[in-house]
Image (cartoon, rainbow, N blue to C red):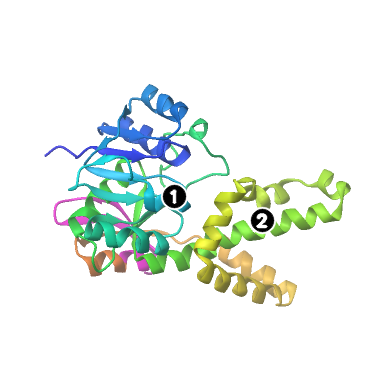
Amino acid sequence: MPAPPVGVVGLGQLGGSLAAALVAAGREVRGWDVDPAARDAAADRGVRVTRELAGVVVLAVPLPVTAGALDGLDVDPAATVTDLGSVKGPVLASLGPRLGGRFVGGHPMCGTERSGHEATDPGLFRGAPWALCLEPGTELSRWLRAAEVALDAGAEVVPVTAAEHDDAVAAVSHVPHLLAAALAAAAGEAGPLALSLAAGSFRDGTRVIASDPAFVTAMVEGNAGPTAAALARVRAQLDRPWPDLVTAGHAVRAASAGRRPVRVPVDRPALLALGRAGGAVTRRLAAFVEGWVPEGA
């Protein structure tokens, strides 16, 4: 049975990269963007530019406009709808009542500080974790269709709930954006000499705050509760004796857990258990998925 077509709404860095990756994987890809230049760039990469979307429809638009992203488009009422937004609770709250079990929240962990269709990279998703939300009302068959899109793009699928996702990314994505902003602002206050001496550690520590400020603000404010809690944990760490802090941080960063291959049935508890153990899905079989979990999990 052929894979259903994929429709991508928003053809900037993430959407354009996804569309290009799926074309390379042999999927039929349709797409739309309000920007004519983004549409032209996608068409040059083999995307059929149209407002008529079906199969699996992916919303690759900024968080503030996600709720209205399908307005004005001709979307098959049987289509599965997923998204690429960096916060899942608010998106689920806005789209869930409208789409029901055919909405599957998603978030690939692979963006960069660049944006726009000029930043398209078909290899962007290769090996990246892609969180895919499995809520009590999510139709499992539609979750699998969304998972196949992620796998075809080269990503590894991490089954989660929206709440689990938002708690986790607050710690590893949203707080780092705030810390990068604080580090850059503090260095600016230190004066031009400090900035002229800034090298690798400063560049790496501040890279993500080169992102569009509106994007970062929407992300952290959209996940305000978990981000505040995660930031409080960072503040508590900074209050520790510095040698203890350095040692503890180094131990976490230097740890290299091996991977153990697993095969789990396609059912909600087994998939969520895989994600909660820190594992991911790498391949879809008939009644099973293959993937991995960390050694010892």
Cα separation, mark 1 vs mark 2, equals 26 Å
Instruction: Mark 1 or mark 2: name the one nearer the start of the chain.
Output: 1
Which residue is at a point 24% across and 62% down the rendered structure image? 138
Residue 22 vertical placement versus 84 (above, below): above
The quarter of the picture where the C terminus appears is: bottom left
For this rendering, which residue is in front, 129 or 103?
103
Point out which mark residue 65 bears.
Answer: 1
Which kind of residue does numbered mark 2 sit on?
Ala
Q: Quadrant of residue 228?
A: bottom right
- Circle 1 crowding by C-alpha within 10 Å: few under 14, some 14–19, many from 20: few
Q: Quadrant of residue 259?
A: bottom left
Please name the residue that numbered disc 2 is placed on.
Answer: 180
Point out which mark residue 202 bears.
Answer: none
Residue 154 appears at what percent x and percent y? 35, 42
Q: Which residue of the protein is positioned furthest toward the top in this rendering?
A: 44
The quarter of the picture where the N terminus appears is: top left
Dot 2 falls on a residue whose secondary structure is helix
Magenta run includes residue 165: no
Residue 25 visible (yes or no): no
Which kind of residue does numbered mark 1 sit on?
Val
Judge from the rendering whether residue 166 lies leftward or rightward of residue 22; answer left or right: right
Which residue is at a point 49% across and 62% down the rendered structure image? 169
User: Which residue range is magenta in the image?
Assistant: 274-297
Residue 176 appears at what percent x and percent y? 60, 59
For this rendering, which residue is in front, 36 or 226?
36
For this rendering, which residue is in front, 186 or 49?
49
Residue 36 vertical placement versus 113 (above, below): above
